[in-house]
């Protein structure tokens, strides 16, 4: 079972993160990128082998009756179809390597930097556990919205981001980091 709610649809540089490891899951959970973030929608995909385990007459007890009253949103499905069309027609995956490289180049010297595709993070080593939050607040003054996880700052720009926007984003992060960590 693979949860690709955050990592699916190109976020890691491949359509799905499991492709990096050559794994084909029995269950694949997808969401956020499915609609481009415009509407909530999630799907759970299964392998043919798993699906066949639920096929049968109801008297055999093998059917899988599942659903919720809020499932099957026509608007959400329409948004997903439109998003997938844009993904295909604008060749989003083919444009990612340049953006991924540029993001990595600009952040490589930041403390404890790591990256997987368009997911980048850095961690400030400090006993002040609110430092990450302070950097995020300072970044807002430079037009960058991000959030900390402790003293780790994550950047997950939209896949449609331009190289100029990546440069401005990292510059804002650096400015905020310098402001917060500069000796007083």
Image (cartoon, rainbow, N blue to C red):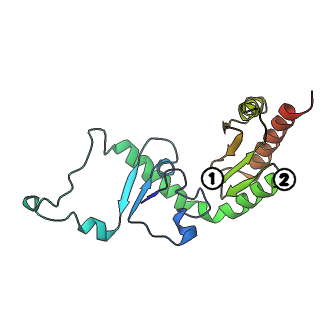
Question: Disc 1 or disc 2, which is closer to the eye?
Answer: 2
Residue 57, by quadrant, is: bottom left
Mark on residue 81?
Answer: none
Residue 41, by quadrant, is: top left
Look at 26% across and 46% down and name the residue there: 67
Quadrant of the rendering where the C terminus is positioned: top right
> Foreground: 118 or 20?
20
Say whether disc 1 or disc 2 marks the residue closer to the N-terminus: 2
Please give left or right for residue 75 compared with residue 116 in the image. left
Q: Which residue is mark 1?
A: 159
Q: Can you say whether 23 is above or below 45 in the image?
A: below
Mark on residue 109?
Answer: 2
Image coordinates of residue 169 in percent, x first then y, are 76, 43
Q: Can you say whether 175 is above or below 117 in the image?
A: above
User: Helix, strand or loop at disc 1?
Assistant: loop
Q: Can you say whether 85 is above or below 154 in the image?
A: below
Please give left or right for residue 86 compared with residue 112 in the image. left
> Foreground: 175 or 163?
175
Look at 38% across and 65% down and name the residue there: 26
Assess whether mark 2 and mark 1 are in contact (beta carbons under 8 angstroms): no
Image coordinates of residue 177 in percent, x first then y, are 82, 37
Look at 65% across and 59% down and name the residue there: 117
Residue neighbourhood size for the residue with mark 2, other residues' Cα within 10 Å, grouped as few (<14), some (14–19), many (≥20) = few
Image coordinates of residue 99 in percent, x first then y, are 72, 58
Quadrant of the rendering where the N terminus is positioned: bottom left
Please give left or right for residue 129 compared with residue 27 in the image. right
**Count of all numbered marks drawn on residues in the image:** 2
Q: CA distance from mark 1 to mark 2?
A: 23 Å
């Amino acid at each position: 079972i693979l949860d690709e709610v955050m990592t699916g649809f190109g976020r890691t540089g491949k359509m799905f993160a499991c492709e990096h490891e050559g794994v084909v899951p029995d269950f694949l959970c997808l969401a956020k990128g499915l609609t481009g973030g415009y509407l909530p929608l999630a799907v759970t995909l299964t392998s043919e082998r798993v699906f066949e385990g639920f096929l049968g007459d109801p008297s055999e007890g093998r059917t899988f009756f599942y659903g919720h009253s809020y499932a099957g949103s026509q608007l959400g499905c329409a948004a997903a179809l439109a998003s997938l069309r844009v993904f295909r027609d604008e060749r989003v995956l083919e444009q990612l390597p340049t953006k991924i490289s540029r993001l990595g180049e600009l952040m490589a010297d930041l403390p404890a930097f790591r990256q997987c595709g368009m997911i980048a993070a850095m961690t400030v080593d400090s006993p002040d556990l609110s430092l990450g939050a302070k950097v995020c607040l300072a970044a807002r003054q430079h037009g960058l919205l991000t959030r900390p996880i402790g003293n780790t700052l994550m950047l997950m720009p939209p896949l449609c981001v331009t190289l100029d926007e990546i440069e401005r984003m990292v510059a804002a992060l650096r400015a905020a980091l310098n402001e917060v960590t500069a000796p007083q």
